[in-house]
Image (spheres, rainbow, N blue to C red):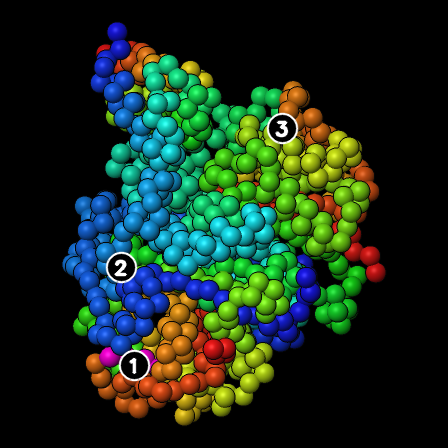
């Protein structure tokens, strides 16, 4: 769909200049689940497992399938940095284009619903009982989800050359990645990794904190993430923090794992194009620890020129993607 | 920090743990010796139908290297990475201020599929409501890398790459790309893969293992591979950064190319090899030896041999996988470590016991001594379509 | 009366976790608060809860989680649900 939307005709492209950069958390967990279930059903005998099934499991097959489908012969990569993977993949694509190593990169993230993630987050008491309510005082966790978000990134010169300037939806201005280096599942309460990623992102994009119009939060709806993320935003944006709208799209689509920040990037591009800020839904009671403008429940018209999109992950992996309105 | 695809990138430290040993001296000695294999069968929740010969670690004692603290809930793959990083880079981390410590990027096809599969198995056997929550963090593929970031308080970056057989080499290329894009001056990067029930069972089902229990890259009688495991990690920095801290240069990554080949017909292999040479600014004839990706695959080895014959008709070819086994995501990084070891010892290590190749390529079977190649080419071509090559320049 | 086996099991696990985190054994007492006195984190509490549930075959609702902050309180909670089961 993204490729169709871009209007690219791959028969006219040099395949060596087209790359693929994807992210994921679990990859193809359902394949491993199927194989193991079959093993147990057959008391350990593996005869019933189809010969070609196991080879479809390693998550490297995902970019390989995309690259094969589009005959993309440039760099192809899978970056499985869990719930921040989308941002990492888009960031790598940005670097490939910036260094002239590709003209076009299909970038994004995907994750199917997985028993591992569902079981795991439940065992960590991190899942919401009813709905996901990011930043709300009574929030009680995330809603495990699935999905995919894809973007076609192209160098400006290439877009101009094929007469596609008018079709540009938004611009990737830069990105920052960092790590809490604190704990595998608990965010650093001092927000070190999130603050570092945000600052690096702004620096990479060469924009001042003052220029940011909207922040797409990681906003999973857990007590810890939302509190820490609020702290991170205040640390970087200072007094201006509570004037910048912040919303969590996970309130609407749940936590789609490795796809999350890619889907959020797609949404951010559309927010830029439509000058509309999407809300945090299910919001009813403010939390003193989370006291920013979370765009509660209703979308808002606003000039949206510069967006920062946060994404954090297990392991303390942090990221910030900076998107902007394309100006000639 | 400048942005430049021209910036020189050098390796100033390295460490590896594999069936070849834990130190550079072990590796050098093992490369001259007969390949060492072991047998595995039992993996806790599951048991292979028959014992599988493989290039597994022997006497791997993570606590002896890492101490006891903080290992209780870490899985074997993570301990393997931590042990490798501890051996090679503990001093580097300890003598660098926390806010200046390099980031880490590790390539692994699976992370730890043993942990992932066991988590699922535990849920089936004991019920999902009884699964240990502490086992969940080990199921994310970036767990080993992030655990290294945590242990060494490395905050600059933490990345993981998972392009199957090419995961390790692509992690090195990711690190180089990241540095050249101006985000950092240096990064610790490498490859990691452990032997696991699920990988071995999957290989057996897919028919890629050697039925004859042999590892004969390019051999006429080759019938598949023997699995191996290991971890190889390198400190990559810009030449300026290395000079700024008076670091001795082990080798230079003079060129690189990563690409994809949907047809698996050798075009990708040629593209990667010529791309790497061209980015290094060297002609193919300048390459002193090629470290092949070949692992005993009947089709894969033939495709690589043809591509090498086309571009490097007279160049000696080393097949380190004869000594390491097929280590999946770690394979190319282990081959890189072997190539660096050989360069330091002015030799090209042979495959060991001779076998017929039918002249398919100029395979080095008996070790060649007193050779001082200036450049080596490290290949990694996978049956998934990923192709990558690195040009290594001797800086000693 | 709390089954001494329950307390012993909790104590053993806490000791194991504390050793791994290099927490002084002297801090491990029946009334010490896991987080504020011993320096454990929320993951450790979760592990204790999950391990006791599995070991004693009980299901402890999430609402009890804020209560299991000392060895004594943890043992009492497990005993409560064990008794309910009978």
Q: Nearer the viewer, residue A31 or B171?
A: B171
The quarter in which the N terminus of chain B is drawn is bottom right
- Kindly tell me whether residue A11 is visible in this rendering: no
The residue pinned by badge 2 equals: B57
Chain under disc 1: B
Is circle 2 on the same chain as circle 1? yes
Q: Of all residues shown, which one is farthest toward the bottom? A: B314
- Kindly tell me whether residue C26 is visible in this rendering: yes
Dominant secondary structure of the residues highlighted in magenta in the image: loop
Residue depth check, mark 3 versus mark 1: number of the one nearer the observer = 1
Q: Which residues are magenta?
A: B348-352
Q: What is the spatial separation of the Cα atoms under label 3 and label 1, in whole angstroms?
A: 62 Å
Q: Earlier in the sequence, mark 2 or mark 1?
A: 2
Q: Nearer the viewer, residue B229 or B359?
A: B229
Dot 3 surroundings within 10 Å: few (below 14), some, or many (20 or more)? many
The residue pinned by badge 3 equals: A135
């Amino acid at each position: 769909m993204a490729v169709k939307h871009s209007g690219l005709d791959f028969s006219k492209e040099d395949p060596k200049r087209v790359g693929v950069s994807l992210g994921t958390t679990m990859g193809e967990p359902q394949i491993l689940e199927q194989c193991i279930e079959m093993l147990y059903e057959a008391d350990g005998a593996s005869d019933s497992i189809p010969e070609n099934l196991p080879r479809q499991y390693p998550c490297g097959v995902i970019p390989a399938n995309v690259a094969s489908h589009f005959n993309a012969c440039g760099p192809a990569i899978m970056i499985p940095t869990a719930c921040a993977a989308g941002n990492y993949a888009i960031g790598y694509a940005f670097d490939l284009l910036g260094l002239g190593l590709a003209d076009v990169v299909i970038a994004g993230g995907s994750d199917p619903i997985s028993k591992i993630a569902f079981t795991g987050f439940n065992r960590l008491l991190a899942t919401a009982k009813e709905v996901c309510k990011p930043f709300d005082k009574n929030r009680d966790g995330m809603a495990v989800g699935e999905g995919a978000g894809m973007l076609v990134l192209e160098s400006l010169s290439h877009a101009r050359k094929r007469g596609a300037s008018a079709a540009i939806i938004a611009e990737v201005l830069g990105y920052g990645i960092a790590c809490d280096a604190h704990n595998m599942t608990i965010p650093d309460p001092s927000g070190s990794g999130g603050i570092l990623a945000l600052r690096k992102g702004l620096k990479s994009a060469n924009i001042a904190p003052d220029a940011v119009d909207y922040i797409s939060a990681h906003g999973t709806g857990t007590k810890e993430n939302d509190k820490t993320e609020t702290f991170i935003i205040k640390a970087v944006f200072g007094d201006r923090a509570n004037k910048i709208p912040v919303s969590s799209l996970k309130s609407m689509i749940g936590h789609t794992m490795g796809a999350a920040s890619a889907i959020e990037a797609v949404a951010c591009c559309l927010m830029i194009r439509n000058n509309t800020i999407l809300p945090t839904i299910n919001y009813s009671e403010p939390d003193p620890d989370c006291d920013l403008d979370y765009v509660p429940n209703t979308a808002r018209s606003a000039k949206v020129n510069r967006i920062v999109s946060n994404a954090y992950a297990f392991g303390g992996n942090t990221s910030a993607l900076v998107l902007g309105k394309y100006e000639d | 920090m400048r942005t430049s695809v021209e910036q020189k990138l050098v390796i100033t430290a390295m460490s590896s743990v594999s069936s070849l040993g834990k130190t550079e001296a072990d590796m050098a000695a093992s490369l001259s010796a007969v390949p060492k294999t072991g047998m595995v069968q039992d993996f806790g929740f599951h048991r292979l139908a028959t014992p599988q010969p493989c290039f597994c670690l022997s006497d791997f004692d993570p606590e002896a290297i890492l101490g006891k603290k903080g290992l209780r809930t870490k899985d074997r793959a993570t301990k393997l990475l931590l042990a490798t990083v501890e051996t090679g880079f503990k001093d580097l981390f300890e003598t660098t201020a926390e806010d200046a410590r390099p980031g880490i990027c590790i390539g692994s096809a699976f992370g730890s599929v043993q942990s992932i599969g066991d988590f699922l198995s535990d849920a089936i056997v004991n019920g999902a409501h009884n699964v240990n929550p502490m086992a969940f963090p080990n199921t994310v593929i970036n767990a080993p890398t992030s655990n290294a970031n945590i242990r060494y308080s490395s905050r600059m970056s933490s990345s993981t790459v998972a392009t199957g057989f090419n995961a390790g080499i692509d992690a090195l290329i990711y690190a180089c790309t990241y540095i050249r894009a101006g985000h950092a001056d240096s990064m610790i990067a490498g490859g990691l893969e452990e032997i696991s029930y699920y990988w071995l069972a999957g290989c057996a089902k897919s028919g890629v293992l050697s039925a004859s229990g042999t590892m004969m890259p390019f051999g006429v009688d080759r019938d598949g591979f023997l699995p191996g495991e290991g971890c190889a990690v390198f400190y990559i920095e810009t030449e300026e950064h290395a000079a700024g801290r008076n670091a001795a240069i082990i080798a230079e990554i003079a060129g690189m190319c990563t690409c994809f080949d949907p047809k698996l017909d050798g075009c990708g292999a040629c593209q990667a090899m010529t791309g790497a040479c061209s980015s290094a600014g060297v002609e193919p004839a300048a390459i002193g030896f090629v470290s092949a990706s070949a692992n005993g695959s009947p089709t894969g080895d033939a495709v690589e041999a043809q591509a090498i014959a086309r571009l490097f008709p007279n160049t000696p070819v080393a097949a380190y996988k004869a000594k390491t086994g097929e280590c999946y995501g770690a394979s190319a990084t282990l081959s890189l470590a072997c190539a660096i070891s050989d360069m330091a010892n002015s030799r090209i290590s042979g495959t060991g016991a001779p076998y017929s190749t039918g002249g398919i390529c100029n395979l080095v079977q008996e070790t060649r001594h007193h050779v001082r190649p200036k450049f080596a080419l490290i290949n990694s071509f996978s049956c998934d379509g990923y192709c990558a090559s690195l040009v290594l320049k001797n800086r000693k | 009366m709390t089954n001494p086996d329950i307390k012993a099991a909790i104590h053993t696990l806490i000791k194991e976790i504390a050793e791994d985190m290099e927490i002084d054994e002297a801090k491990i007492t029946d009334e010490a608060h896991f987080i504020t006195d011993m320096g454990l984190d929320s993951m450790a509490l979760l592990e204790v809860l999950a391990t006791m549930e599995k070991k004693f075959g009980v299901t402890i609702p999430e609402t009890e989680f804020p209560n299991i902050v000392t060895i004594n309180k943890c043992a009492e909670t497990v005993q409560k649900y064990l008794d309910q089961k009978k």
